[in-house]
Amino acid sequence: MKKLILPIALILIIGVTLFVSARMTFIYEDDGIYNLYNNEIILEKGWNLINFGGELKSDSEIKQGDIKAIFYYNPSTKQYVRYYPESDEWNNLANQNSCGDQSCNPEERENYANWCYKDCKSELNEDIISNLNVISKKTVTLKKDVKENIDFIKYYDLQVYWNKNSPSGTCDERGYSNIDCVMLHNDITSMNLLNDKEIINSPNDGNPNNDYFGKIILMSSYTDKESLVYIKADYGSNSDEYTFTFYEIEDNKVKSGSNELPIPSVQAKIISQPAWVYSDKRGLLKTESASIKLSQNPLQTGWNFVTITPEFDGRTWNQIKEDCNVISAYVYDAESQKWVDLQSIYSSGTFEEAAEQGQGIVAKVSSSCYLKASIGGGTNNDVNPPNVPN
């Protein structure tokens, strides 16, 4: 039987090393995005819905040979993926590291300010644009050498025109005779902002790297303003003209920043959820675990798998789901192998660390939202020092 390699293996002084694949894909993340804790969970014989993101401790009653299968829920496909025994489907997720799952949802865009810098700094699309703050949008149709003023709200105003020339020669002279090549110029040359923005298009040569018409690409590279400008070029209605659309976007949604939170990989997101673990016997499972914090891990419309972490401690379910419209929520009773309505258990009673930590919840929400994370963790969140006298 192949050795079981568990996903969260090592806590370093300056970060966390995640072993997020049975093939040991290493991903380094800042630990500011994770809850790190020890799990001690009684597994029943049969299926258990628990957080399994950690190494088995040496004194764990449940050993590797007692575990027959582990499945995680993949929220992107809304299907289960087998983690153990090892499956190609799981290992293929190791290649999906762009924005966590190659599909940045609005919540990720809002909370990970560096998502676009890492994954689409130089090129956007209509879906991404729709989730960014477009401060101004200007569309102009230009004939050759006809100048047009473009006024922006926060960025420098420009005077633009196009032809086929650049300081290094015309498009034909530079080998673009079989490619539609347009040079967009800024007439305010002393600012050295645009001057020569080359946009090429050759949809019939089989090379997508030569197809930029209709794409939204970065025009400006200056970071001293509070906005960036992206541009989309396309053909005009006549053969001697082109249409240009300028998008002015708030820079804080696309800027680079070393202090920004890291974007978790798709495997880290999935492992942060509880897993279906099939045990051949009843016993105590001891692991070292990590889960993405509630404030960094939005629920998506429909069903979600949620791990009870230290953030739940001392809180009621109503406090935790405060900002979410929860349609229904359940816990899985491993002893009876049946679902139990969560609201009937935790509507007034609080989650207690020793009893529930590491257990799994499934919650169905009407729209994307965040569960309410406790501040500081522990049962004394509502204990505050006295106010200063008036």
Image: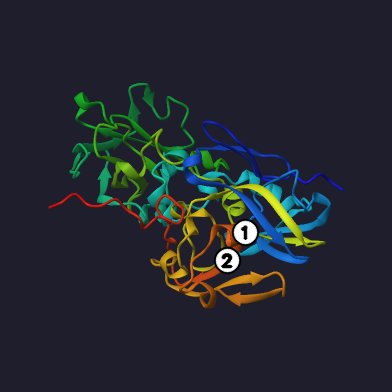
Residue at 70%, 64% (x, y): give it: 48
Q: Residue furthest right?
A: 1
Amino acid bearing label 1: Pro
- Drawn side of residue 319 relative to residue 358, left or right: left
Q: With respect to residue 246, does 368 lie above or below?
A: below
Please say which color scheme the image uses.
rainbow
Q: Which residue is mark 2?
A: 361
Q: Which residue is mark 1?
A: 274
Q: Nearer the viewer, residue 117 or 274?
A: 274
Crowd band around label 1 with a 10 angstrom C-alpha radius: few (<14), some (14–19), many (20+): many
Q: Secondary structure at mark 1?
A: loop
Residue at 87%, 48% (x, y): give it: 1
Q: With respect to residue 344, does 243 lie above or below?
A: above
Is residue 137 at least partly visible in the picture? no
Residue 333: x and y in percent read 66, 71
Q: Disc 1 or 2, which lies upstream in sequence?
A: 1
**Mark 1–mark 2 contact, CB under 8 Å?**
yes
Amino acid bearing label 2: Ile
Residue at 25%, 26% (x, y): give it: 192
Q: Nearer the viewer, residue 315 or 128?
A: 315
Q: Nearer the viewer, residue 99 or 289?
A: 289
Q: Residue furthest left?
A: 390
Q: With respect to residue 228, does 194 lie above or below?
A: above
Residue 274: x and y in percent read 62, 59
Is residue 95 at least partly visible in the picture? yes
- Drawn side of residue 157 relative to residue 347, left or right: left
Q: How many marks?
A: 2
Q: Nearer the viewer, residue 240 or 150?
A: 150
Q: Secondary structure at mark 2?
A: strand
Q: CA distance from mark 1 to mark 2?
A: 8 Å
Residue 278: x and y in percent read 76, 62
Residue 170: x and y in percent read 37, 27
